[in-house]
Image (cartoon, helix red, strand yellow):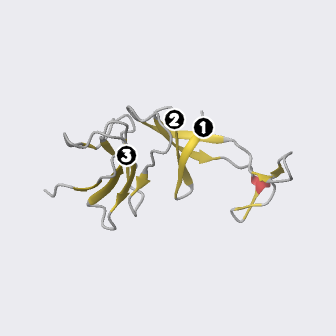
Amino acid sequence: DYCDCVQFVGDLVLSKSINDVIILWKPIFSDSQLKNNVLINYERSEKAGVPRIPNEVQPLREFVLNKCDIWFIRFQTDADCRMLAIGNNIGEIKVWDICTSNPTKKHLAKVDHQTCCTPVRMVSFSPDGRSLATVCDDATVWKWDGRTT
């Protein structure tokens, strides 16, 4: 298992592996490692003295994916880090509300079209969060507009 996409959400982190899941987690640092919210005491890796932050984390929420187990499928949040979107191997895009009070909710929306059927490699929210742009393996770029009610 390896991580192929990561993004900060405030002090939290979203990460995706090829195991069909995105995890929202919180890094945990002891008081001795932080001074004015700055990491001051970190370990040195045995490889070339590279700084290494301790890997204690608290998983907060899992976003379960379906058919998203190949390398280089990227997720993205909107500008406010409230929504999360990702495509999959068969051309579907799922959108979640990151801040929902019901973390067991599957997803907010599923977007698909009968002619979009190849892997969606990357998604991008418009600045206002009302549209998504996606790029697929068949060299197509799609624009998806959200419904307004």
Is tag 3's residue or tag 2's residue first in the polypeptide sequence?
Answer: 2
Image quadrant holding the C terminus, namely bottom left
Q: Which residue is mark 1?
A: 2
Nearer the observer: mark 3 or 1; the answer is 3
Q: Which residue is mark 2?
A: 18
Q: Splitting the image into 4 quarters, where does residue 102 fall?
A: top left
Instruction: Give the residue at x 86% y 53%.
Output: 49
Number of marks in the image? 3
Question: Residue 21: which numbered mark, if any?
Answer: none
Instruction: Give the residue at x 46% y 33%.
Output: 69
C-alpha separation, residue under disc 3 versus residue under disc 1: 22 Å
Instruction: Give the residue at x 21% y 42%.
Output: 115
Viewer-side residue, 3 vs 82: 3
Say few, some or many: other residues with alpha carbon within 10 Å of mark 3 (under 14 / 14 to 19 / 20 or more): some
Q: Splitting the image into 4 quarters, where does residue 55 fall?
A: top right
> Is 51 rendered above or below residue 24?
below
* Amino acid on which disc 3 is placed: Asp
Viewer-side residue, 108 vs 16: 16
Q: Which residue is mark 3?
A: 137
> Is 5 rendered above or below residue 34?
above
